[in-house]
Amino acid sequence: MKKISIGSWAYSIGPYEKNPVPWDDVVNKLKALNFDGVELGGFGIHPNPDDMPEKEQRDKIKQQMADLGLDFSGLAANLWGEHLIDTADTSAYIECFRKNLQFCLDLGIPAIRVDCVQPPTIFDTVDADTARKRVVDTWKVCAAEAADNGIRMAWEFEPGFAFNKPSDILRIVDEVNHDNFGVMFDASHGYMVAVVGARQPGEKETLAGGVLELAQKLRGKINHIHLIDSDGTLHNDETSTHAPFGEGYVDFDELLGELNKNEMGHDWWTIDLCFWANAWDVTARCKEAVDALNTKYGG
């Protein structure tokens, strides 16, 4: 059976930005709902490297998780204030990555998430070849350093960031070409990329086989999975709407059969309710839905 976690950012940003759910409330509720762990959004009021610079502070969070019998499945690092595509010097990005990598080490977090930082409109000012080289060269450095520290690095592609076409995703993973680097496959983003072609610059590139075909093309390159539905829309015209299970079009029966063909080196599935208005209220229902999928496909 898979271990199930949920992204803590669902309770701290977007609709919850002005009234975030405190960390202690989050982890205690997840324990009560029989989650195996949490995927930490390392920003806002939840544990993060800036608010917890001392190792003693980090040890306290690590002990809290151990006392509850919960684990961390990964860290969504706060790299959005850095420059990746729109600068020739990405040293500040790399230093911020290192800071978050150390945070992973101190808390026992096995994976770190990255994205392309800049939106797809960046190609109005930076040509695609230059942009891709900056991303690839930077991520090669990061992937190697993460590997040296035993931390997996996962790229979450999505409509809201540059390189959001199927061929873009495949090319970047191939060019980074590091065993410690892979794709975080979010079912909602996969649908919006492969079926809708949302926010793709120039000519849209979709796949006849939809999200399943995208997963097939990425087989062997996926090292982290986010499960959530898609209703085919964007949240605030920016990124994929992360709709609760049963409120969208993703066929999880066929998709999970394919995703299970990836040897990821771990057995986590993570629920992602990012930007969902009443994420706190639907968490239990989403856990029940994933538990049912776990019974069918998690073995």
Image: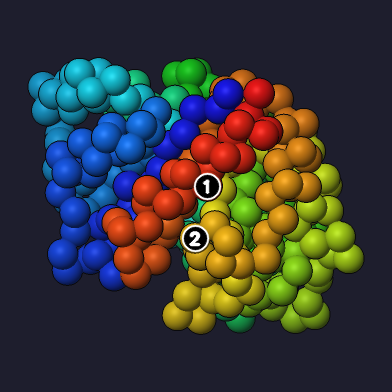
Decide: few, some or many residues near mark 2? Use Cα within 10 Å; few <14, some 14-19, many ≥20.
many
Q: Residue at (47%, 75%) from the top-left corner?
A: 235
200 in relation to 113, above or below = below
The image quarter in which residue 70 lies: top left
Q: Earlier in the sequence, mark 2 or mark 1?
A: 2
Nearest to the observer: residue 57 or residue 147: 57
Evaluate whether residue 114 shows in this view.
no
Disc 2 is placed on an element classified as loop
Q: Amino acid at mark 1?
A: Ala
**Residue position for label 1:** 289
- Nearer the observer: mark 2 or 1; the answer is 1
Q: Position of residue 146 (x, y in %)?
A: 49, 27
Q: Look at 39% across and 39% down and name the residue there.
A: 39
Q: What secondary structure is found at the residue carrying circle 1?
A: helix
Q: CA distance from mark 2 to mark 1?
A: 9 Å
Can you name the residue that lies furthest to the right here? 208
Q: Are marks 2 and 1 in contact (CB under 8 Å)?
A: yes
Question: Quarter of the image containing the N terminus?
Answer: top right
Residue placed under numbered mark 2 in the picture: 244
